[in-house]
């Protein structure tokens, strides 16, 4: 069922004159409707304007771009990064850079469409993917294999342990990871998964991400070595694309204390949910991540009857499988969490 609203769907949304508690979306830290965060963003909008669509190669440049990129690199643990106007564009930017005769693309199940070209598709399962990679490496083909995957693909296969990757000859692979659902949320201070992936020893490691889900700003980023990022920076793709909003990046720099506080609340809400929900066997979830996926339309309908709305739609298109997911956020109160847990206990245990 599609629900229309005229305001941001925070913890409470109004649908047809009725109030519902919302446990969906991707606003993990609850920042988009968090007043202290909004105040920083508003002040930066006054300073930098509502939008800036000039090229990053322009002769007039904002210093905040480099400042934010340096801050992001230090946080994530990469040598360097570049910001873009969205996570999707960041993914396509990275694909465009790697798309040449020197590379052969391989896509893990559930890889986000931001990393796809028109000719590629993901493997249906990890067994087939592993076999295909093994055959390619054993063949006389000279094209370097590039493996694309989402760090958090909501199947529990990758984050947090990445057991599939550990079984691969990563020293012979270029690894490209979309960390849109991880950065800002998991890892030390919201650093995401880059540092953990570095330890696995891939031949090359790139990471891309939206900054909207974990950091609450309209922007994306790509991460890699100084050499690779410098080469990407020199492309027409980067020079021709409009950059992220300077106001957004300035807010990212200035909101460090807010991010930390909201992340602590989110972790507290997650612990409360795990303690109070008696039956989680029907859900797919990952340690430390506030999402709980399931396949039971009756549960969605039951929650709706009790004025709770969760993520429930076909993704990424109408022909795809129904995506049903309970999403906890820092915007929820302890009462919200406890009431949801009680409802789940009632539905799942009886």
Image (spheres, helix red, strand yellow):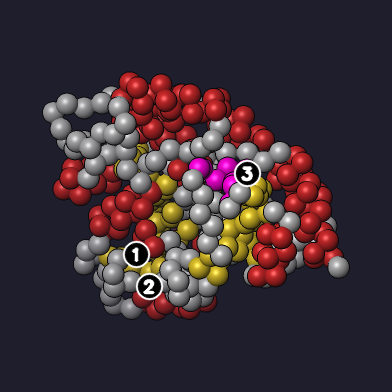
Residue 121's disc is 2
Residue designated by label 3: 12
Considering the image in quadrants, where does the C terminus appear?
Answer: bottom right
Secondary structure category for the residue under label 1: loop
The location of residue 299, given as percent across then percent down, is 71, 66
Would you say the residues marked 2 and 1 are in contact, meaning their CB atoms lie under 8 Å apart?
yes
Q: Report the residue at 79% width, 46% height from top.
A: 338
**Earlier residue among tags 2 and 1:** 1
Q: CA distance from mark 3 to mark 1?
A: 35 Å
Q: CA distance from mark 2 to mark 3?
A: 37 Å
Residue designated by label 1: 116
Nearest to the observer: residue 3 or residue 112: 3
Instruction: Identify the residue at the far front of this view.
Output: 17
Reply yes or no: does residue 14 show up in magenta: yes
Residue 318 against residue 276 in the figure, above or below? below
Nearest to the observer: residue 251 or residue 91: 251
Secondary structure category for the residue under label 2: loop
Residue interval drawn in magenta:
7-15
């Amino acid at each position: 069922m599609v629900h229309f609203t005229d305001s941001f769907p925070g913890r409470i949304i109004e649908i047809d004159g009725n109030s519902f508690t919302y446990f969906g979306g991707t606003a993990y830290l609850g920042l988009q409707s968090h007043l202290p965060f909004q105040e920083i963003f508003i002040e930066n909008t006054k300073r930098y304007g509502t939008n800036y669509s000039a090229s990053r190669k322009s002769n007039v440049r904002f210093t905040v771009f480099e400042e934010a990129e340096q801050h992001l690199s230090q946080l994530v643990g990469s040598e360097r990064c570049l910001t873009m106007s969205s996570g999707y564009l960041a993914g396509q930017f990275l694909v465009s850079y790697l798309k040449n005769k020197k590379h052969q693309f391989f896509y893990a199940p559930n890889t986000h469409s931001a990393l796809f070209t028109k000719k590629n598709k993901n493997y249906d399962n990890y067994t087939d993917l592993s076999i295909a990679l093994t055959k390619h490496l054993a063949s006389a083909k000279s094209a370097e294999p590039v493996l694309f995957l989402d760090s958090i693909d909501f199947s529990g296969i990758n984050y947090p342990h990445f057991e599939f990757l550990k079984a691969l000859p990563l020293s012979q692979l270029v690894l490209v990871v979309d960390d849109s659902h991880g950065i800002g949320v998991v890892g030390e201070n919201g650093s995401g998964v880059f540092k953990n992936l570095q330890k696995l020893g891939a031949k090359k490691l790139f990471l891309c991400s939206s900054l909207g889900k974990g950091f609450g700003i309209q922007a994306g980023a790509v991460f890699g070595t100084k050499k690779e990022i410098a080469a990407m920076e020199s492309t027409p793709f980067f020079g021709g694309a409009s950059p992220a909003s300077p106001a957004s990046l300035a807010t990212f720099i200035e909101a460090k204390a807010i991010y930390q506080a909201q992340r602590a609340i989110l972790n507290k809400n997650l612990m409360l949910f795990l303690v109070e929900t008696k039956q989680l066997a029907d859900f797919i979830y990952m340690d430390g991540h506030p999402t709980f996926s399931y396949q039971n339309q009756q549960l969605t309908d039951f929650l709706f009857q009790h004025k709770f709305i969760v993520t429930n739609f076909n993704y990424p298109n109408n022909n795809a499988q129904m995506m049903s997911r309970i999403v906890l956020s820092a915007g929820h109160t302890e009462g919200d969490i406890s009431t949801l847990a009680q409802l789940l206990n009632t539905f799942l245990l009886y």
